[in-house]
């Protein structure tokens, strides 16, 4: 677009278009005489329906001062016939009706008279000289800005409840003046101009809202001129409320299920308009109100109000997010202590985002994890993430000193002991202990063990090749399906491996074990099919040879057992209700399980021979090389292992040892912190002497959080637990103990 100035003709043309548009709008605005009870003979009343779509230009409300001059109309009602029907007291206030300081004793008759005849003050004609107040040597007056309030969207709204008394030089609230039973500043006259913020506080107060509601109801009964305006306002409010209810329901439905909102277009009636507009179209088929709204205002174009645009949709999503966040923050502040967890991942637009998660305990004693927001990540340095976390906590109104834990993955920039993120957070709060993600640590244990020896690496490559071979062609997949359908057993289809999600590896091994023979038969059929390409037949034949190896059978059975236990443990570790004591126990039980596998090689060998239908190891079937021995060369006494011993020592024991080593190392990060708290799980069985030592150690660590009486409180709580019925499985559950504390409100005992 050019930055040159418009010519005179262009400016006149734009001004003419603007004037025509304004005149067109004004022709649609209802005239004031429409709201009189008695109308001229040439004017007919138009009935309105709650389901009719209102015009955006016909909205006339009490807050729209530019279209309605109520003060001019109310003067018409103040005629001689009307005043003759009132008492002398009411006749007295006719001349000073707009001066609340001169109103007589308020009774029901006076209230009716004032409401029926009170006109809106013309601010420009008021004399504010009597409002002069001295503050030290500075004089302050009522300002016209006090009669208006600025909304968040920048719109200025008149405070119609505010009325100025020229005789007293003070401001009054007309609704409170008429209906407030106990006096307050705005019934006696407000004149503290230095603290004008009290106007805002008053209009947000409960008493003011109640009195304003009484004023509006009294207006309705009296049939004031604004009653018709108010009725139209309520009808339009009701209409748009019905529209917004449907929109909010659709947004909540799509948001709760993580579905996309947008489409390629934003026009009703098109197939590619996205889930948001499409869902509204589906509802409109069974909802005449929404159907009429979409038909009337569905595609209005820019500048027209319909509440169906993407802007309104985004605004509602933002409002819902703010409401949820405020609720989470209220719960956090009520329970004080939190733990934080962050992790970064790129989205579909290749933008790196940091997920910010916070964990805390509800008042009921139930631990919860809440996702708070995505944060665009400019870099992966620990210093950058430190700044982001501190700024986020500050923006949410949370104190870093209330953080008692932090959990990230095992990357060096996160878990580094000196310059990692966890070390930087500890500089701000030494009690924010770092606990690595237990599920992620367990995945790393599996990844390390899977790459610790040649046979393990070859096995997982073999598993992935099976999935890739069958899934690369619909013809091969149909051959496999035919073999599975002809079987009476429950056979799982081949699964792909995953580098990060080890439950996928567990599923792949379980599928291979369940369909070992059928997969082999399908591969054999493909390798013998003359219509297949030679490359496909050769690849199928190579996979068949792998199926016929005893090593493959042993590794299939062994890794299936290991990964099944890893998968179940990993899913338990990912539960929100998991606690540190349970993490330590799970790692310990998994470590004991792996150690027990060391003596089960013979069992795996037997099972491997059954599924592979092979009795000999590959090494035993290979031709042995004769190495010539030279007299002038030193000959070492090399130990040559047979097939079974080689498989057992160079593969099986290596994997077992790697799993044990990694589990032991990873569990240290949890046992060190667990040593402070694990006596709670043995509270019912621990002796008083040890309990005293452990509580003392905990109080020393959290000297600002715990009282010295923790030992006596634990003894008291222990006696209480012995007197109530507890399930056997809950007698060593700190989480259950916490719920009992909260449910029985035992935490209040120390406050009595």
Image: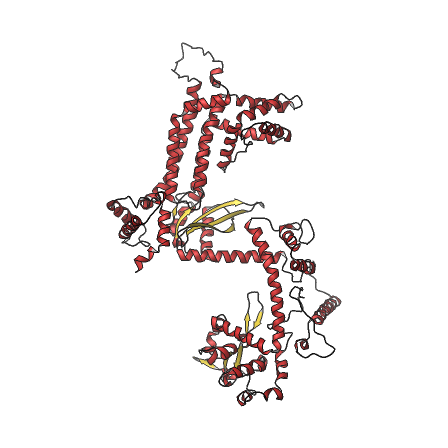
Report the side of 725 relative to 107 (left or right). Answer: left
Picture residue at 56% right of the left edge, 47% below the top: 351
- Please give the name of the residue rendered at 46% of the width and 36% of the height, measured from the top-left corner: 567
Residue farthest to the top, as pictured: 631
Reply above or below: 561 against 635: below
Residue 190 in view of the camera: no
**Residue 149 vs residue 588, the one in the foreground:** 588
Q: Is residue 648 visible?
A: yes
The N terminus, quarter of image: bottom right
Q: Decide: is 612 above or below 242.
A: above
Give coordinates of residue 7: x percent, y percent: 73, 66
Numbered disc total: 0
Q: Position of residue 312 (x, y in %)?
A: 60, 58
Q: In the image, 631: left or right of 502?
A: left
Q: Is residue 602 above or below residue 490?
A: above
Asked if 585 appears above or below 112 in the picture, the reply is above
Q: Residue 288: give x, y in percent of width and height.
A: 66, 58
Q: Which residue, as the protein is rendered here, is positioned at the far bottom?
A: 88
Image-quadrant location for residue 295: bottom right
Could you tell me which residue is drawn at 52 percent across and 74 percent down? 214
**Farthest residue, direction right:** 9
The picture places residue 635, in percent across and down from the top left corner, at 39, 13
In front of the other: 590 or 228: 228
């Amino acid at each position: 677009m050019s930055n040159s100035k418009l010519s005179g003709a262009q400016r006149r043309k734009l001004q003419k278009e603007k004037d025509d548009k304004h005149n067109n709008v004004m022709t649609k605005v209802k005239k004031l005489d429409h709201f009189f009870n008695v109308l001229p003979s040439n004017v007919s009343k138009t009935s309105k329906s709650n389901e009719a779509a209102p015009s955006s230009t016909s909205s006339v409300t009490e807050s729209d001062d530019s279209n309605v001059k109520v003060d001019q109309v109310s003067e018409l009602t103040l005629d001689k016939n009307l005043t003759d029907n009132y008492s002398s007291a009411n006749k007295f206030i006719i001349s000073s009706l707009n001066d609340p300081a001169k109103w007589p004793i308020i009774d029901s008759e006076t209230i009716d008279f004032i409401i029926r005849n009170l006109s809106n003050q013309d601010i420009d004609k008021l004399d504010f000289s009597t409002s002069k107040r001295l503050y030290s040597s500075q004089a302050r007056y009522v300002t016209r800005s006090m009669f208006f309030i600025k909304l968040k969207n920048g719109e200025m709204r008149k405070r119609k409840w505010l009325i100025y008394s020229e005789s007293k030089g003070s401001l009054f609230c007309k609704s409170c003046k008429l209906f407030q039973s106990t006096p307050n500043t705005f019934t006696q006259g407000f004149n503290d101009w230095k603290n004008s913020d009290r106007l805002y506080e008053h209009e947000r107060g409960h008493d003011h809202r109640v009195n304003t509601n009484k004023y509006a109801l009294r207006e309705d009964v009296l049939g004031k001129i604004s009653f018709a305006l108010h009725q139209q306002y309520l009808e339009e409010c009701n209409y748009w409320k019905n529209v917004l209810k449907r929109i909010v329901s659709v947004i909540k439905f799509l948001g709760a299920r993580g579905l996309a909102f947008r489409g390629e277009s934003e026009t009703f009636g098109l197939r590619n308009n996205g889930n948001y507009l499409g869902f509204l179209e589906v509802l409109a088929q069974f909802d005449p109100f929404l159907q009429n709204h979409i038909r009337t205002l569905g595609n209005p174009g820019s500048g027209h109000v319909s509440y169906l645009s993407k802007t309104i949709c985004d605004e509602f999503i933002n409002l819902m997010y703010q409401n949820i966040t405020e609720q989470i923050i209220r719960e956090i502040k009520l329970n004080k202590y939190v733990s934080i967890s962050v992790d970064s991942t790129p989205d579909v637009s290749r933008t790196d985002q940091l997920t910010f998660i916070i964990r805390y305990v509800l008042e009921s004693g139930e631990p919860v994890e809440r996702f708070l927001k995505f944060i665009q990540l400019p870099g992966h340095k620990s210093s950058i993430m430190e700044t982001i976390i501190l700024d986020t906590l500050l923006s949410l109104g949370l104190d870093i000193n209330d953080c008692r834990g932090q959990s990230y993955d095992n990357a060096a920039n996160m878990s580094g002991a000196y310059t990692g993120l966890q070390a930087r957070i500890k500089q701000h709060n030494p009690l924010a202990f770092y606990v690595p993600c237990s599920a992620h640590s367990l995945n790393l244990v599996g990844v390390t063990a899977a790459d610790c020896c040649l046979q393990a690496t070859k096995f997982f490559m073999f598993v992935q090749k099976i999935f890739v071979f069958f899934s690369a062609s619909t013809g091969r997949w149909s051959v496999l399906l035919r073999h599975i359908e002809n079987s009476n057993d429950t056979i799982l289809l081949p699964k792909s491996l995953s580098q990060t999600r080890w439950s996928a590896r567990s599923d792949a091994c379980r599928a291979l074990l369940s369909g070992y023979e059928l997969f082999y038969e399908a591969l054999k059929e493909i390798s013998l099919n003359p219509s297949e390409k030679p490359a496909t037949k050769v690849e199928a034949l190579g996979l068949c040879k792998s199926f016929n190896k005893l090593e493959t059978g042993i590794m299939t059975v062994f890794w299936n057992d290991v990964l099944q236990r890893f998968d179940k443990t990993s899913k338990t570790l990912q539960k929100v209700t998991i606690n540190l004591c349970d993490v330590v126990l799970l790692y310990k039980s998994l470590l004991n399980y792996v150690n027990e596998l060391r003596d089960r090689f013979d069992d795996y060998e037997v099972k491997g021979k059954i599924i592979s239908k092979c009795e000999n190891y590959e090494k035993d079937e290979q031709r042995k090389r004769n190495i010539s021995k030279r007299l002038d060369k030193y000959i070492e006494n090399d130990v040559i292992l047979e097939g079974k011993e080689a498989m057992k020592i160079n593969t099986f024991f290596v994997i077992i040892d790697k799993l044990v080593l990694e589990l032991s190392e990873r569990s240290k990060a949890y046992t060190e912190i667990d040593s402070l708290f694990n006596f709670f799980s043995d509270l019912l069985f621990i002796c008083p002497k040890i309990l005293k030592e452990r509580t003392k150690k905990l109080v020393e660590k959290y000297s600002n959080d715990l009282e010295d009486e923790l030992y006596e409180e634990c003894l008291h709580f222990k006696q209480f637990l012995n007197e109530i019925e507890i399930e056997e499985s809950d007698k060593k559950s700190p989480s259950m103990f916490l719920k009992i504390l909260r449910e029985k409100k035992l935490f209040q005992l120390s406050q009595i």
